[in-house]
Image (tube, rainbow, N blue to C red):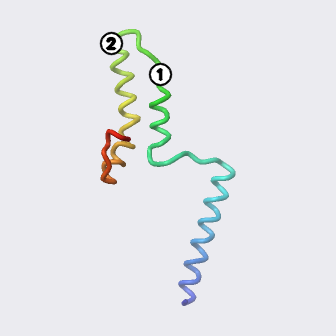
Amino acid sequence: PSEVEVKEKKDRVDDALNATRAAVEEGIVAGGGTALLRAANALTVKGSNPDQEAGINIVRRALQAPARQIATNAGEEAARA
């Protein structure tokens, strides 16, 4: 490998190590919309009138939307997300 290729590989290793250190020190959030899906599932509050229920459902669907779109983009059935 050329000197440039060796430097490129070293930089990739350094980046991976730094990302791993940051994840260990600061924690991580599940990707792919998982955290938002968990938030939607945790949204158990009930509205005291139909307008509040509609608003809660809008927020719930908004929290689910990224995971549904990711599933659709991957060729999966969005309803399963």
Residue at image location 49% in from the left, 35% down from the top: 38
66 vs 3: above or below: above
Q: Which mark is residue 44?
A: 1
Image-based side of 62 in relation to 45, left or right:
left
Residue at image location 58% in from the left, 81% down from the top: 7
Q: Which mark is residue 50?
A: 2
Q: Which residue is most to the top?
A: 48
Tag count in the figure? 2
Residue at image location 59% in from the left, 73% down from the top: 11
Can you give x and y, in whole percent of width and height, for residue 19 in the image?
61, 59
Residue at image location 67% in from the left, 52% down from the top: 24
36 vs 76: above or below: above
Can you give x and y, in whole percent of width and height, for residue 23 in the image?
63, 53
Quadrant of the rendered structure where residue 64 is? top left
Residue type, mark 2 in image: Pro
Quadrant of the rendered structure where residue 77 is? top left
20 vs 35: above or below: below
| Mark closest to the chain's N terminus, 1 or 2 | 1
